[in-house]
Amino acid sequence: MTENKNKGKKLFLVGVGPGSPKYLTDLVKEVIIRSKYLIGYKYTLGIIKDLIVHDFHQVYEVTMKNQDEIYNEVYKKMQHDEFCTIPFTGDVNFSESEVVDRLLEIFGNDNVELVPGISSIQVAASESKVPLDKTRVLSFHVTDDIEDKKSELVDAIQHEKSVILVPRPWNNNVTKNFMQSDIAFYLKNKGIDTSHLKVWVFEFLTTVEERVFRGKLNELENMDFSPMSVTVIDQVKRRTYLDFE
Ligand SMILES: C[S@@+](CC[C@H](N)C(=O)[O-])C[C@H]1O[C@@H](n2cnc3c(N)ncnc32)[C@H](O)[C@@H]1O
């Protein structure tokens, strides 16, 4: 957060890491400390709870249902030069654009600053030792149609790339789910030999509930995982600089 850049800026959309407050950057902490208004889901407010000063911060816990109303309410309430921060899980720049785009509309593009955080995708890459630059990263956690993304998934696997993805849980409509079991069946139906593909599923990364499944993709058929999970399909071929001499 730089003073010059901030002139006239009001809203900070910050990534607070996938679960543990240890993944909060100093920059994000600074922005939170200076913001009179904090708006977030229960999960992200939980990550920053130790930074909340009850005499200073006005905290709004939102749900999918009431978020739009609250964003508008706070926007109207804010005085010139007051700050508001909205914490996002992981990195605000990954799989959050449906909310970010709405906030740009409400607050105005020039009044909004995005501050990156550490994504669940990055933590999954670290734990599986699968480099992101050799990986197709996909989010199915969107309301939009996912057919094109499913084709990208098939294409990546056929081109022997690794894949790191967040699945799609869908409340009250299982036909819209695209969870690990659905993914395993889908890829098998596309003619891919899923019994040879190495897979990792990470649930509740960086929290005390963290769990890891490691096996072959076909083993995911009929297995249930939390919506709070990241899947890695590991096709890494390790090559060091010595291979290129
Ligand atoms: C809307 S996406 C947001 C992703 C987030 N911006 C990020 O960078 O991690 C939400 C999905 O991210 C994944 N996710 C976020 N935090 C996670 C965690 N601690 N462990 C596992 N998956 C997580 C889950 O798949 C969750 O349903």
Image (spheres, rainbow, N blue to C red):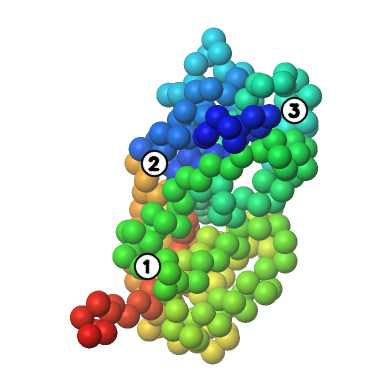
Secondary structure of residue under mark 1: loop
Mark 1 lies on residue: 131
Marks 2 and 1, Cα distance to the nearest angstrom? Answer: 19 Å
Give the camera-side residue of 151 and 216.
151
Return the residue found at the far top: 55
Q: Counting residues from the N terminus, which is met first, the one under dot 2 or under dot 1? A: 2
| Residue hosting label 2 | 23
Q: In this view, does 229 lie to the left or right of 155?
A: left
Q: List x then y, in percent, for residue 223.
A: 47, 65
Residue at x 58% of width, y 86% of height: 190
In the image shown, does 105 or 187 lie closer to the viewer?
105
Q: What element carries label 2?
A: helix
The picture quadrant where one finds residue 239 is bottom left
Residue for point 60% across, 20% down: 36
Q: Where is residue 148 in the image (x, y as percent from the top left)?
A: 67, 74
In-front residue for pair 27/17:
27
Which comes before the other along the chain, label 3 or label 2?
Answer: 2
Give how far across and how far down residue 108 sits, in percent. 76, 39
Query: Does residue 231 lie above or below 81 as drawn?
Result: below
Is disc 3 placed on a helix, strand or loop?
helix
Residue 209's tag is none
Dividing the picture into quadrants, the one containing residue 71 is top right
The residue that appears at 32% across and 80% down in the rendered structure is: 237
Q: In the figure, residue 144 lies in which quadrant?
A: bottom right
Residue type (three-letter) at the residue carrying disc 3: Tyr
In the picture of the structure, the residue carrying the numbered disc 3 is 75
Q: Can I make out residue 213 in this image?
A: no
Q: Is residue 13 above or below residue 151?
A: above
In the rendered image, the quadrant that contains the C terminus is bottom left
Which residue is found at the position 67% from the left and 46% from the top?
100
Looking at the picture, how far across and down is residue 49, in whole percent?
47, 26
